[in-house]
Amino acid sequence: MNETYTIITTEIQQFIATPNSMRSLLILIISIVVAYWLSYYITRIIIKIAQLIAIRSDNTTSYEKRIKLRRIETYFSVSIAIVRALIVGIVAFYTWQLLSPGVNLSTATIGASAFFIVIAGATIGMILRDLTAGSTMIAESWFDVGDFIRVEPFLEVGGVVERMTLRSTKLRSLNGEVVWLHNQHIHGVKVTPGGLRRIAVDVFANNENVGRNLIEKVIATMPVGTLKVAAVPKIVESEKWSEKLWHFVIVAQTTPGREWLMDNYFIEALTDVDERRRGPQTFVRKPIARYSDERAEQSFKRAVRINKQSKY
């Protein structure tokens, strides 16, 4: 019994120590399994941490803190690809050492470098361009995970950034479609701050009380939700322009692509309510819808200079 055990142990040791095809195949299979499961569990941990940060960023009321948390979430998203590459590289290195124990490290390094130079132009060139573009966008903070962007030069490509790596960017459009982009093809982006667009509607009425009541009646019918009107529209301004002319400003925020809820549905509803009301017409002009972004207005105050002495 002891002799049989000794023989089996000796054969196993010789099989492991002596290079052969079966040993190489076994080491290769084990290394692939180890690299896969190790990268899988580590990336799952990183994703879990990123999700917790995403929940905190969605619940915080501070705009600056939300931006910082989303930037951290972006870095975690990018680190997934880096961690996977490091795991594969480390496992591949030790697999090479096991398969070729007698090969000098410097020789292996020279051979690997030569192999890389040969295939880099055709195979890795595209990946390197993606990595360069992704690194530049992250370093310059073009956008973060959770931002709504539109991609140039693709006119119809846009959505919420769900994931960003050094190689690619994943978007979720308003209709639920998933869009994957190689970073090298992103020539430019249009970022919507906070994922919302601020729409203002100017309404002109000949009676303040009647006009306000009609506007509030239409506001009560507006659909409110994440992919609709983000919050209940508000009358932010009411000003008397003349004896029979009052100016109201109604402001609402919508997701990009849902502006029609204010510049179409809301205006048509105002006209319809006024026409159905008994009595003279209240709204003397057709309401005007326009974008109303506070930061844009501040920027344009510096850019727009009216020369009051010029003659038209």
Image (cartoon, rainbow, N blue to C red):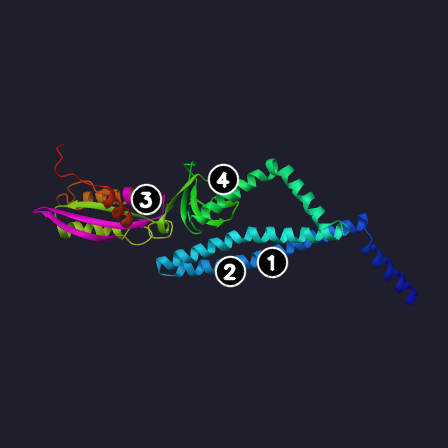
Extent of the magenta region: 234-263
Residue furthest out toward the bottom = 2
Q: Position of residue 282 (x, y in %)?
A: 15, 45
Q: Residues within 10 Å of mark 2 (few under 14, many from 20)?
A: some
Task: Looking at the image, tell me whether mark 1 or mark 4 is earlier in sequence order.
Answer: 1
Q: Is residue 248 above or below residue 65?
A: above
Locate the N terminus and report the quarter of the image it occupies. bottom right
Amino acid type at circle 2 is Ile
Name the residue tied to disc 1.
Answer: 41
Task: Looking at the image, tell me whether mark 3 or mark 2 is earlier in sequence order.
Answer: 2
Q: Helix, strand or loop at disc 3?
A: loop
Q: Position of residue 52 (x, y in %)?
A: 48, 61
Q: Residue at x 68, y 44 (%)?
A: 110
Q: Helix, strand or loop at disc 2?
A: helix
Locate the C terminus and report the quarter of the image it occupies. top left
Name the residue tied to disc 4.
Answer: 184
Amino acid type at circle 4 is Gln
